[in-house]
Image (tube, rainbow, N blue to C red):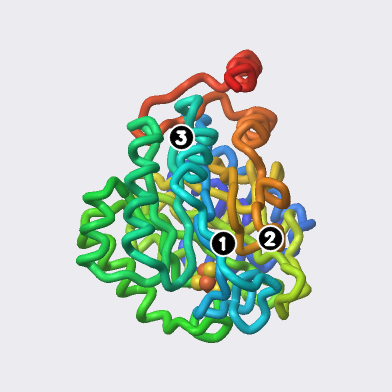
Amino acid sequence: MEQRVRQILERALEGTPPGREECVYLLGFPEHAPEAAWTRAAADTVARGKTGNTGLLFGQVGLELYPCEADCKFCAFGKTHTGFSGKITLGEEEIRQKVHDFTKDGDLYCLWLMTMDKYDLGYYLRAVEIARETAPPQTLLYTNIGDTDYETFVKLKAAGADGAYHVVRLGEGTYTAIPPARRRETIEAARRAGLMLQDCLEPIGTEHTPEELVDHIFATIAGGFDTAGVMKRTPVPGTVFTDEITNARLAQIVAVNALAVMALDPYPWIPVHEADPVSLASGANSICAETGVNPRDTAADTARGRGLDVTACREMLWQAGFTHLAKGDGTRVALTRAYIERCKANA
Ligand code: SF4
Protein backbone atom coordinates (compact mmCIF):
# COMPACT_ATOMS: atom_id res chain seq x y z
CA MET A 1 0.00 0.00 0.00
CA GLU A 2 1.26 3.49 -0.79
CA GLN A 3 2.78 5.22 2.23
CA ARG A 4 0.66 8.36 1.74
CA VAL A 5 -2.54 6.30 1.95
CA ARG A 6 -1.34 4.72 5.19
CA GLN A 7 -0.66 8.15 6.69
CA ILE A 8 -4.08 9.55 5.68
CA LEU A 9 -5.92 6.53 7.07
CA GLU A 10 -3.92 6.43 10.31
CA ARG A 11 -4.72 10.11 10.89
CA ALA A 12 -8.41 9.42 10.20
CA LEU A 13 -8.44 6.57 12.71
CA GLU A 14 -7.00 9.03 15.24
CA GLY A 15 -9.80 11.54 14.47
CA THR A 16 -8.49 13.82 11.70
CA PRO A 17 -10.53 13.76 8.48
CA PRO A 18 -8.80 13.80 5.09
CA GLY A 19 -8.74 17.14 3.27
CA ARG A 20 -10.02 17.84 -0.24
CA GLU A 21 -6.83 16.89 -2.10
CA GLU A 22 -6.42 13.75 0.00
CA CYS A 23 -9.98 12.67 -0.89
CA VAL A 24 -9.27 13.20 -4.60
CA TYR A 25 -6.10 11.13 -4.18
CA LEU A 26 -7.94 8.30 -2.39
CA LEU A 27 -10.58 8.20 -5.13
CA GLY A 28 -7.87 7.95 -7.79
CA PHE A 29 -7.20 4.28 -6.98
CA PRO A 30 -9.22 1.61 -8.79
CA GLU A 31 -11.85 -0.04 -6.61
CA HIS A 32 -9.98 -3.37 -6.66
CA ALA A 33 -6.69 -1.87 -5.41
CA PRO A 34 -5.43 -2.66 -1.88
CA GLU A 35 -5.53 1.10 -1.18
CA ALA A 36 -9.29 1.07 -1.81
CA ALA A 37 -9.75 -1.95 0.47
CA TRP A 38 -7.86 -0.25 3.32
CA THR A 39 -9.83 2.96 2.79
CA ARG A 40 -13.09 1.04 3.08
CA ALA A 41 -11.88 -0.72 6.23
CA ALA A 42 -10.84 2.55 7.89
CA ALA A 43 -14.15 4.22 7.00
CA ASP A 44 -16.12 1.28 8.37
CA THR A 45 -14.20 1.49 11.65
CA VAL A 46 -14.66 5.27 11.91
CA ALA A 47 -18.40 5.30 11.08
CA ARG A 48 -19.28 2.40 13.38
CA GLY A 49 -17.27 4.03 16.16
CA LYS A 50 -19.06 7.36 15.69
CA THR A 51 -22.55 5.80 15.70
CA GLY A 52 -22.23 2.99 18.25
CA ASN A 53 -22.51 0.44 15.42
CA THR A 54 -26.01 1.67 14.64
CA GLY A 55 -27.98 1.49 11.40
CA LEU A 56 -31.05 3.34 10.18
CA LEU A 57 -34.13 2.23 8.29
CA PHE A 58 -35.56 4.76 5.85
CA GLY A 59 -38.75 4.34 3.86
CA GLN A 60 -40.00 6.10 0.76
CA VAL A 61 -43.56 6.24 -0.54
CA GLY A 62 -43.77 7.41 -4.16
CA LEU A 63 -47.10 9.25 -4.20
CA GLU A 64 -47.58 10.30 -7.79
CA LEU A 65 -46.36 9.57 -11.28
CA TYR A 66 -46.74 11.55 -14.49
CA PRO A 67 -44.31 12.70 -17.20
CA CYS A 68 -42.13 15.13 -15.27
CA GLU A 69 -41.26 18.62 -16.52
CA ALA A 70 -37.78 18.53 -14.99
CA ASP A 71 -36.97 15.84 -17.59
CA CYS A 72 -33.95 14.46 -15.75
CA LYS A 73 -32.04 12.26 -18.20
CA PHE A 74 -31.40 9.59 -15.56
CA CYS A 75 -35.00 9.25 -14.37
CA ALA A 76 -37.75 6.89 -15.54
CA PHE A 77 -40.26 9.78 -15.39
CA GLY A 78 -38.52 12.46 -17.54
CA LYS A 79 -41.17 13.77 -19.96
CA THR A 80 -39.24 13.28 -23.21
CA HIS A 81 -38.31 9.64 -22.63
CA THR A 82 -40.68 8.13 -20.04
CA GLY A 83 -42.51 4.92 -20.88
CA PHE A 84 -45.32 5.95 -18.52
CA SER A 85 -48.30 7.88 -19.87
CA GLY A 86 -51.23 9.32 -17.95
CA LYS A 87 -51.17 9.90 -14.22
CA ILE A 88 -50.99 7.65 -11.19
CA THR A 89 -51.92 9.20 -7.83
CA LEU A 90 -52.15 7.26 -4.58
CA GLY A 91 -55.47 7.78 -2.80
CA GLU A 92 -55.77 8.60 0.91
CA GLU A 93 -56.38 5.00 1.99
CA GLU A 94 -53.45 3.72 -0.10
CA ILE A 95 -51.17 6.31 1.50
CA ARG A 96 -52.40 5.38 4.97
CA GLN A 97 -51.88 1.66 4.29
CA LYS A 98 -48.38 2.10 2.85
CA VAL A 99 -47.29 4.34 5.74
CA HIS A 100 -48.73 1.84 8.21
CA ASP A 101 -46.92 -1.08 6.55
CA PHE A 102 -43.58 0.76 6.76
CA THR A 103 -43.94 2.06 10.31
CA LYS A 104 -46.00 -0.53 12.23
CA ASP A 105 -42.92 -1.92 14.03
CA GLY A 106 -41.94 1.52 15.28
CA ASP A 107 -38.30 1.36 14.15
CA LEU A 108 -38.37 3.40 10.91
CA TYR A 109 -36.04 6.39 11.37
CA CYS A 110 -37.66 8.48 8.66
CA LEU A 111 -40.18 8.34 5.88
CA TRP A 112 -39.89 10.28 2.62
CA LEU A 113 -42.98 11.27 0.66
CA MET A 114 -41.94 11.63 -2.96
CA THR A 115 -43.68 13.32 -5.85
CA MET A 116 -42.68 14.93 -9.16
CA ASP A 117 -41.02 18.29 -9.85
CA LYS A 118 -44.40 20.08 -10.10
CA TYR A 119 -46.99 18.97 -7.59
CA ASP A 120 -50.39 19.87 -6.24
CA LEU A 121 -49.83 21.47 -2.85
CA GLY A 122 -53.28 20.63 -1.46
CA TYR A 123 -52.80 16.94 -2.28
CA TYR A 124 -49.28 16.89 -0.90
CA LEU A 125 -50.22 18.67 2.34
CA ARG A 126 -52.97 16.09 2.87
CA ALA A 127 -50.46 13.27 2.25
CA VAL A 128 -48.15 14.73 4.92
CA GLU A 129 -51.06 14.99 7.37
CA ILE A 130 -52.08 11.37 6.75
CA ALA A 131 -48.50 10.19 7.18
CA ARG A 132 -48.16 12.16 10.43
CA GLU A 133 -51.43 10.71 11.77
CA THR A 134 -50.40 7.17 10.81
CA ALA A 135 -46.68 6.98 11.61
CA PRO A 136 -45.51 6.82 15.22
CA PRO A 137 -44.03 10.06 16.61
CA GLN A 138 -40.50 8.62 16.61
CA THR A 139 -40.52 8.36 12.79
CA LEU A 140 -39.43 11.59 11.10
CA LEU A 141 -41.20 12.77 7.95
CA TYR A 142 -39.14 14.19 5.07
CA THR A 143 -40.40 15.85 1.91
CA ASN A 144 -38.97 14.72 -1.43
CA ILE A 145 -40.51 17.24 -3.83
CA GLY A 146 -39.64 19.73 -6.55
CA ASP A 147 -38.35 23.22 -5.95
CA THR A 148 -40.41 24.93 -3.29
CA ASP A 149 -40.47 28.35 -1.61
CA TYR A 150 -40.15 29.30 2.05
CA GLU A 151 -43.88 29.95 2.63
CA THR A 152 -44.77 26.50 1.33
CA PHE A 153 -42.16 24.81 3.51
CA VAL A 154 -43.68 26.62 6.49
CA LYS A 155 -47.05 25.05 5.60
CA LEU A 156 -45.47 21.64 5.12
CA LYS A 157 -43.81 21.89 8.51
CA ALA A 158 -47.14 22.84 10.10
CA ALA A 159 -48.70 19.76 8.43
CA GLY A 160 -46.12 17.49 10.07
CA ALA A 161 -42.93 17.50 7.97
CA ASP A 162 -39.69 17.35 9.98
CA GLY A 163 -37.22 17.70 7.15
CA ALA A 164 -36.53 17.93 3.44
CA TYR A 165 -34.48 15.76 1.10
CA HIS A 166 -33.27 18.16 -1.56
CA VAL A 167 -30.06 17.83 -3.52
CA VAL A 168 -28.03 19.66 -6.14
CA ARG A 169 -27.47 16.57 -8.19
CA LEU A 170 -24.42 15.70 -10.28
CA GLY A 171 -25.04 17.18 -13.73
CA GLU A 172 -27.80 19.48 -12.44
CA GLY A 173 -28.73 21.88 -15.26
CA THR A 174 -27.05 19.61 -17.84
CA TYR A 175 -28.81 16.29 -17.34
CA THR A 176 -31.83 18.09 -15.87
CA ALA A 177 -33.91 21.15 -16.82
CA ILE A 178 -33.32 22.72 -13.38
CA PRO A 179 -30.63 25.37 -12.75
CA PRO A 180 -28.42 24.41 -9.77
CA ALA A 181 -29.10 27.85 -8.23
CA ARG A 182 -32.80 27.04 -7.96
CA ARG A 183 -32.03 23.80 -6.08
CA ARG A 184 -29.80 25.73 -3.68
CA GLU A 185 -32.56 28.34 -3.12
CA THR A 186 -34.96 25.53 -2.21
CA ILE A 187 -32.48 24.05 0.28
CA GLU A 188 -32.09 27.43 1.94
CA ALA A 189 -35.89 27.95 1.99
CA ALA A 190 -36.32 24.61 3.79
CA ARG A 191 -33.55 25.51 6.23
CA ARG A 192 -35.16 28.90 7.00
CA ALA A 193 -38.50 27.15 7.58
CA GLY A 194 -36.83 25.11 10.33
CA LEU A 195 -36.68 21.78 8.51
CA MET A 196 -33.82 19.31 8.88
CA LEU A 197 -31.85 18.69 5.70
CA GLN A 198 -30.63 15.57 3.96
CA ASP A 199 -28.03 15.57 1.21
CA CYS A 200 -26.78 12.86 -1.13
CA LEU A 201 -23.97 12.53 -3.64
CA GLU A 202 -26.08 11.38 -6.59
CA PRO A 203 -26.58 10.03 -9.17
CA ILE A 204 -23.01 8.81 -9.73
CA GLY A 205 -22.11 7.56 -13.21
CA THR A 206 -18.89 6.32 -14.80
CA GLU A 207 -18.04 9.79 -16.16
CA HIS A 208 -17.76 11.48 -12.77
CA THR A 209 -14.20 12.35 -11.83
CA PRO A 210 -12.77 12.23 -8.29
CA GLU A 211 -12.69 16.06 -8.34
CA GLU A 212 -16.43 16.33 -9.11
CA LEU A 213 -17.28 13.82 -6.39
CA VAL A 214 -15.10 15.58 -3.85
CA ASP A 215 -16.60 18.99 -4.74
CA HIS A 216 -19.99 17.64 -3.74
CA ILE A 217 -18.68 16.00 -0.54
CA PHE A 218 -17.18 19.31 0.61
CA ALA A 219 -20.38 21.19 -0.31
CA THR A 220 -22.20 18.74 1.97
CA ILE A 221 -19.77 19.54 4.76
CA ALA A 222 -20.18 23.29 4.22
CA GLY A 223 -23.99 22.93 4.10
CA GLY A 224 -24.27 21.23 7.49
CA PHE A 225 -26.65 18.43 6.48
CA ASP A 226 -27.76 15.75 8.93
CA THR A 227 -27.26 12.95 6.42
CA ALA A 228 -24.59 12.58 3.75
CA GLY A 229 -25.75 9.82 1.44
CA VAL A 230 -24.21 8.28 -1.68
CA MET A 231 -26.18 6.89 -4.62
CA LYS A 232 -25.11 5.46 -7.91
CA ARG A 233 -26.97 6.03 -11.16
CA THR A 234 -29.13 3.14 -12.25
CA PRO A 235 -29.21 2.63 -16.04
CA VAL A 236 -33.01 2.68 -16.27
CA PRO A 237 -34.24 1.25 -19.60
CA GLY A 238 -35.46 4.10 -21.82
CA THR A 239 -33.05 6.70 -20.38
CA VAL A 240 -29.89 7.71 -22.25
CA PHE A 241 -27.58 6.11 -19.69
CA THR A 242 -26.51 2.52 -20.12
CA ASP A 243 -23.34 2.59 -18.02
CA GLU A 244 -23.08 1.88 -14.31
CA ILE A 245 -20.33 2.06 -11.69
CA THR A 246 -19.71 -1.15 -9.78
CA ASN A 247 -20.91 -1.63 -6.24
CA ALA A 248 -17.23 -1.88 -5.27
CA ARG A 249 -16.62 1.64 -6.67
CA LEU A 250 -19.78 2.87 -4.95
CA ALA A 251 -18.42 1.49 -1.66
CA GLN A 252 -15.06 3.20 -2.23
CA ILE A 253 -16.87 6.53 -2.71
CA VAL A 254 -19.00 5.82 0.38
CA ALA A 255 -15.79 5.25 2.31
CA VAL A 256 -14.09 8.48 1.26
CA ASN A 257 -17.32 10.37 1.99
CA ALA A 258 -17.56 8.73 5.44
CA LEU A 259 -14.00 9.79 6.27
CA ALA A 260 -14.38 13.34 4.96
CA VAL A 261 -17.60 14.06 6.90
CA MET A 262 -15.75 13.45 10.15
CA ALA A 263 -15.37 17.23 9.78
CA LEU A 264 -19.06 17.55 10.75
CA ASP A 265 -20.28 17.55 14.34
CA PRO A 266 -22.57 15.77 14.95
CA TYR A 267 -21.39 13.08 12.59
CA PRO A 268 -24.06 12.65 9.88
CA TRP A 269 -25.82 9.42 9.02
CA ILE A 270 -24.58 7.85 5.79
CA PRO A 271 -27.23 6.31 3.57
CA VAL A 272 -26.27 4.25 0.53
CA HIS A 273 -28.61 3.76 -2.37
CA GLU A 274 -29.41 1.26 -3.58
CA ALA A 275 -28.80 -0.84 -0.50
CA ASP A 276 -25.65 -2.92 -0.87
CA PRO A 277 -23.67 -5.08 1.58
CA VAL A 278 -20.24 -3.89 0.38
CA SER A 279 -21.11 -0.26 1.15
CA LEU A 280 -22.57 -1.28 4.52
CA ALA A 281 -19.10 -2.61 5.37
CA SER A 282 -17.45 0.62 4.12
CA GLY A 283 -18.98 3.41 6.22
CA ALA A 284 -22.64 3.44 5.14
CA ASN A 285 -25.26 2.76 7.81
CA SER A 286 -28.67 3.67 6.37
CA ILE A 287 -30.78 2.00 3.70
CA CYS A 288 -34.22 2.63 2.27
CA ALA A 289 -37.32 0.53 1.74
CA GLU A 290 -39.47 1.74 -1.16
CA THR A 291 -43.05 1.46 -2.28
CA GLY A 292 -45.15 3.26 -4.92
CA VAL A 293 -43.39 4.90 -7.85
CA ASN A 294 -39.58 5.05 -8.07
CA PRO A 295 -37.43 7.09 -10.53
CA ARG A 296 -35.07 4.12 -10.93
CA ASP A 297 -37.74 1.60 -11.81
CA THR A 298 -40.01 0.92 -14.76
CA ALA A 299 -42.55 -0.85 -12.49
CA ALA A 300 -45.41 1.44 -11.43
CA ASP A 301 -45.13 0.06 -7.87
CA THR A 302 -41.48 -0.47 -7.01
CA ALA A 303 -42.45 -2.84 -4.18
CA ARG A 304 -43.03 -5.31 -7.06
CA GLY A 305 -39.82 -4.24 -8.81
CA ARG A 306 -36.49 -2.91 -7.50
CA GLY A 307 -37.74 -1.73 -4.11
CA LEU A 308 -36.77 -3.58 -0.91
CA ASP A 309 -39.30 -3.94 1.90
CA VAL A 310 -38.54 -3.02 5.52
CA THR A 311 -37.95 -6.64 6.53
CA ALA A 312 -35.32 -7.06 3.82
CA CYS A 313 -33.60 -3.82 4.93
CA ARG A 314 -33.58 -4.90 8.58
CA GLU A 315 -32.12 -8.23 7.57
CA MET A 316 -29.42 -6.60 5.42
CA LEU A 317 -28.35 -4.29 8.26
CA TRP A 318 -28.14 -7.27 10.65
CA GLN A 319 -26.15 -9.30 8.11
CA ALA A 320 -23.77 -6.32 7.82
CA GLY A 321 -23.08 -6.59 11.55
CA PHE A 322 -25.03 -3.63 12.92
CA THR A 323 -26.16 -4.26 16.49
CA HIS A 324 -28.64 -1.39 16.91
CA LEU A 325 -31.26 0.57 14.97
CA ALA A 326 -31.82 4.26 15.75
CA LYS A 327 -35.27 5.83 15.60
CA GLY A 328 -35.99 9.42 14.63
CA ASP A 329 -36.22 10.53 18.26
CA GLY A 330 -32.73 9.25 19.03
CA THR A 331 -33.82 6.13 20.92
CA ARG A 332 -32.34 2.79 19.87
CA VAL A 333 -33.43 -0.81 19.68
CA ALA A 334 -31.14 -3.86 19.71
CA LEU A 335 -30.97 -5.41 16.23
CA THR A 336 -30.95 -9.17 16.82
CA ARG A 337 -32.19 -12.23 14.97
CA ALA A 338 -34.99 -12.58 17.57
CA TYR A 339 -36.03 -8.93 17.03
CA ILE A 340 -36.20 -9.43 13.26
CA GLU A 341 -38.36 -12.53 13.72
CA ARG A 342 -40.69 -10.66 16.12
CA CYS A 343 -41.16 -7.90 13.52
CA LYS A 344 -41.84 -10.49 10.81
CA ALA A 345 -44.52 -12.08 12.99
CA ASN A 346 -46.18 -8.65 13.44
CA ALA A 347 -47.98 -8.99 10.10
S1 SF4 B 1 -35.68 12.84 -10.85
FE1 SF4 B 1 -37.47 13.87 -9.93
S2 SF4 B 1 -37.45 15.92 -10.85
FE2 SF4 B 1 -36.18 14.63 -12.18
S3 SF4 B 1 -37.56 13.85 -13.80
FE3 SF4 B 1 -37.50 12.33 -12.12
S4 SF4 B 1 -39.27 12.85 -10.83
FE4 SF4 B 1 -38.84 14.65 -12.13
Q: Earlier in the sequence, mark 1 or mark 3?
A: 3
Q: Label 1 vs label 3: CA separation?
A: 39 Å
Query: Which corner quadrant holds the N terminus?
Result: bottom right
Q: Earlier in the sequence, mark 1 or mark 2?
A: 1
Residue position marked by numbered label 2 in the rendering: 297
- Residue type, numbered disc 2: Asp
The answer to whether residue 213 is seen in the rendering is no
Binning the other alpha carbons within 10 Å of mark 1 as few (below 14), some (14 to 19) or many (20 upward) gives: some
Q: Nearer the viewer, mark 1 or mark 3?
A: 1
- Residue type, numbered disc 1: Ile
Is the shortest distance between ligand 1 and the CB of mark 3 under 8 Å?
no
Say what secondary structure mark 2 lies in: loop
Q: Nearer the viewer, mark 2 or mark 3?
A: 2
Binning the other alpha carbons within 10 Å of mark 2 as few (below 14), some (14 to 19) or many (20 upward) gives: many
**Which residue is at a point 66% across and 75% down the rendered structure image?**
82
Say what secondary structure mark 3 lies in: helix
Along the horizontal axis of the image, is 125 left or right of 280? left
The answer to whether residue 96 is seen in the rendering is yes
On the image, the x and y values in percent for residue 113 come to: 45, 52
On the image, the x and y values in percent for residue 105 come to: 50, 25
Residue position marked by numbered label 3 in the rendering: 51
User: 61 or 127: which is nearer to us?
Assistant: 127
Residue position marked by numbered label 1 in the rendering: 88
Query: Which corner quadrant holds the C terminus?
Result: top right
Instruction: Relative to 335, say whether 88 is above or below.
Output: below
Q: Earlier in the sequence, mark 2 or mark 3?
A: 3
Binning the other alpha carbons within 10 Å of mark 3 as few (below 14), some (14 to 19) or many (20 upward) gives: some
Along the horizontal axis of the image, is 99 left or right of 25? left
